[in-house]
Every structure is written in C-alpha cells, then in structure tokens.
Amino acid sequence: MIKEEKKAAANNKRSKKIKIIGQDELEVKTIAEAMLDKKARNVVSMDLKSIGTSICDYFLICNADATTNVLAIAENVEERMLSDFNTKVIRAQGRENAFWVILDYGNIVVHIFQTEYRAFYRLEDLWADAKKTEYND
C-alpha cells in the first residue's frame, strides 16, 4: 500500500510539472492572439530556454506603426492575461512615449515596438540561437 501511495504522489508531481510547462505555452499563444486582435504586425515568439544566459523563458515581439496602436496592443495583452490566467503584469515600461512597451510576466517578456524602433534594436538578431515561431492572422 505504501508503494502505491508513493507512486501516486510521484505521478501527481509529474502531472503538475507538465501542467506548468503547458501553461507557459498556452500563455504565449494567448499573448500572440491578443497582439493579432489589435492588428500587431510581425508577431514572433522566441523560446529562450535553450539559451542558458537568458533572464526569461520566452520573448514575444511585435510592432505597429502608431503609438496609439502600440498602447492598444499592450492593453489588450494585459486584459487577456488577467481574464484568461488571472495573471497581472509584474512590470511595465514605455507607456509614456509608446515607442517600445515592455510587459514583464516573469517567465515571459512582451516587447511591443513602433516599427522603426523594432528595426533599429533587432532583438531577434541578438537572440538568433533561440527557436522562433511566427504568428499570423
């Protein structure tokens, strides 16, 4: 009986780990959808887990031409993360000028650029070793 209880406890721990891993991927997909809902362009996720020096597991990057669009995308991402996962942004930066808004969710960092700033900073090139996924409407 004790062996069976230990085995059940081990299986329970494994299923929790699987759920957590799956949750990250679901959050990434939800953020990408929230970006696309507000007409974001060039939506990309980068899986940074394989890069040992990264400060998070995922980057999500997109761009828009106008500051109002950048702010609308950021607001929609925050609303969806709160409604779908009950997750609030830990830190947000860049709303004051809306050239580059960063939303930090701990394991996921969201970058919303005005188009010319994305071209200038080229984050995808800095983390070129990461697995990249593109999202379209």
Image (tube, helix red, strand yellow):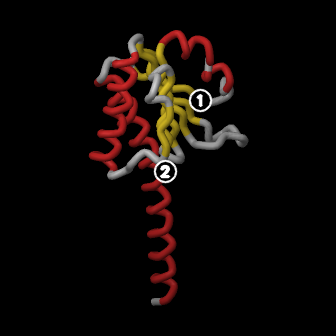
Residue that appears at 66% across and 23% down: 128
Residue that appears at 66% across and 19% down: 125
Q: Secondary structure at mark 1?
A: strand
* Residue 131, disc: 1
The quadrant the C terminus occupies is top left
Residue that appears at 47% across and 16% down: 114
The quadrant the N terminus occupies is bottom left
Residue corresponding to mark 2: 21
Left or right: residue 59 versus residue 15 is right
Residue that appears at 35% across and 19% down: 69
Residue 17: tell me if it is visible.
Answer: yes
Give the amino acid type for the residue marked by disc 1 in the picture.
Lys
- State how far apart marks 2 and 1 are (Cα): 16 Å
Looking at the picture, tell me which residue is in the foreground, 60 or 79.
Answer: 79
* Residue 7, disc: none
Q: Label 2 neighbourhood size at 10 Å, few (<14), some (14-19), many (20+)?
A: few
Which residue is farthest right?
Answer: 53
Residue 25 higher or lower than 76, as above or below? below
Give the amino acid type for the residue marked by disc 2 in the picture.
Ile
